Amino acid sequence: MANKDVIEKDKSYIAHTYNRFNVALKTGYGSRVIDFDGKSYIDFGSGIGTNALGFCNEQWLEAVISQAQQLQHTSNLFYTLPDAKLAEMLCKITGYSNVFFGNSGAEANEGAIKIARKHGIETKGKNCNKIITLKNSFHGRTVTTLSATGQDVFHQHFFPFTEGFLYVAANDIQELYNAIDNTVCAVMIEFVQGEGGVIALSKEYVKAIENICKEKNILLIADEVQTGIGRTGTFLCCEQYEVFPNIITLAKGLGGGLPIGAILSDETVKDVLQAGHHGSTFGGNPVVCAGAAAVLRQIANSDSLSDIRQKADYFRRELLEIPEIIEISGLGLMIGISLSEELNAAEIAADCIDNGLLILTAKNKLRILPPLNITYDEINEGIHILKAVLDGKK
Ligand SMILES: *Cc1c(COP(=O)(O)O)cnc(C)c1O
């Protein structure tokens, strides 16, 4: 089979919800992947931040295969070990009190919203159910997480949307302060707006949000679906902001490429959801959890995290040498690239892919979310391709 055969089959039978590139990927190893025509690529996208350890990492594979051979799934009517082990690891690494497992980022955010509403209603009465989110945020594709997403383009086609979200401009603490009244149960933020254009919130702003939330007895929810699991150079991004949100949601990088979402709860909210209040058939799946544990074993240690920070510095230094690049945004290995005005990021990304580099975009920027264990050789090779593509535009 060649790329065109796969693409033809996909177009005939898969719903047309994605604008895919004309490439069908077949096999990968580390930060390299090969398509059905035999062409090789360097991967600066890691499946949008999911393949935290690149393709087919050996320890991850071993964990997944060995669990699949023992017990692939039961149901949440029974206890299994891999989810309990993974939850213990997450709590010990982060200081959170317990974990709920689902299957995606949107689902983790839905659960966080349910916790916040139930907590608000129980502590302050049934009108205390509104959640403040930020303009330009992204929280997922379900009807409720689309509502939570502070971008008008996502509030179309699927009416009626879930009520109860208020949107305020990022980094404007006065606007947030003015939006708070006794009907607000939570504030939900991304530390670095990912899909919104790789824009980091200021530390003062995040600190001020935490202080207001404490003062007014409102929950702070951090959507770390993209920023979590070492992506920004600390295990959780909240560490760099020196805050401890009541709830953290995780997904993308956690499974190393298998579907998982997680809600971390602190002492205040750990018992809000009780039997019958929430659930998921596949949540806590043994194979997925065994894979996630292999991700944590390789990422959640000071050597790996310091390695990620060094690679992030290296990326930033090298990228800023390229004349067509005017600004680098984001944190750690979550990198946004602003190009000089005449260049179109989507076109550059398509050209990079033609030349053997998988790279992402976010709004009008190029976006790099490489595997966290990418090697310096792979980084250099990818940057070389990007440089050549930008050079060719002169
Ligand atoms: C990707 C993303 C989501 C949605 O995750 P899915 O797994 O696609 O549901 C939610 N929030 C943030 C910050 C994300 O980056």
Image (cartoon, grey):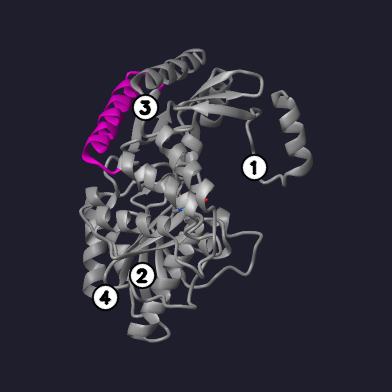
Quarter assignment of residue 120: bottom left
Marked residue nearer the N-terminal end (2 or 4) = 2
User: Judging from the image, what secondary structure is the residue with disc 1 in?
Assistant: loop
Label drawn at residue 186: 2
Which stretch appears magenta? 300-324
Ligand 1 is within 8 Å of the C-beta of the residue at disc 3: no
Marked residue nearer the N-terminal end (3 or 4) = 4
Measured in 3D between alpha carbons, the distance from the residue under mark 3 to the one under mark 2, in whole angstroms, is: 37 Å
Classify 10 Å Cα crowding around label 1: few (below 14), some (14-19), many (20 and above).
Answer: few
Q: Is residue 59 magenta?
A: no
User: Judging from the image, what secondary structure is the residue with disc 2 in?
Assistant: strand
Marked residue nearer the N-terminal end (4 or 1) = 1
Amino acid at pointer 3 = Ile
Classify 10 Å Cα crowding around label 3: few (below 14), some (14-19), many (20 and above).
Answer: some
| SS assignment for the magenta stretch, majority | helix
Marked residue nearer the N-terminal end (3 or 1) = 1
User: Judging from the image, what secondary structure is the residue with disc 3 in?
Assistant: strand
Amino acid at pointer 1 = Tyr
Task: Report x, y in % for residue 346.
Answer: 55, 31
Measured in 3D between alpha carbons, the distance from the residue under mark 3 to the one under mark 4, in whole angstroms, is: 42 Å
Measured in 3D between alpha carbons, the distance from the residue under mark 2 to the one under mark 4, in whole angstroms, is: 9 Å
The mark lying in front, picked from 3 and 1, is: 1
Does 307 appear above or below 178? above
Name the residue nearer the viewer: 298 or 96.
298
Measured in 3D between alpha carbons, the distance from the residue under mark 4 to the one under mark 1, in whole angstroms, is: 41 Å
Q: Which residue is mark 3?
A: 326
Q: Which residue is mark 4?
A: 217
Classify 10 Å Cα crowding around label 4: few (below 14), some (14-19), many (20 and above).
Answer: some
Q: Which residue is mark 1?
A: 18
Q: Residue drawn at (73%, 38%), measured in percent from left and top? A: 10
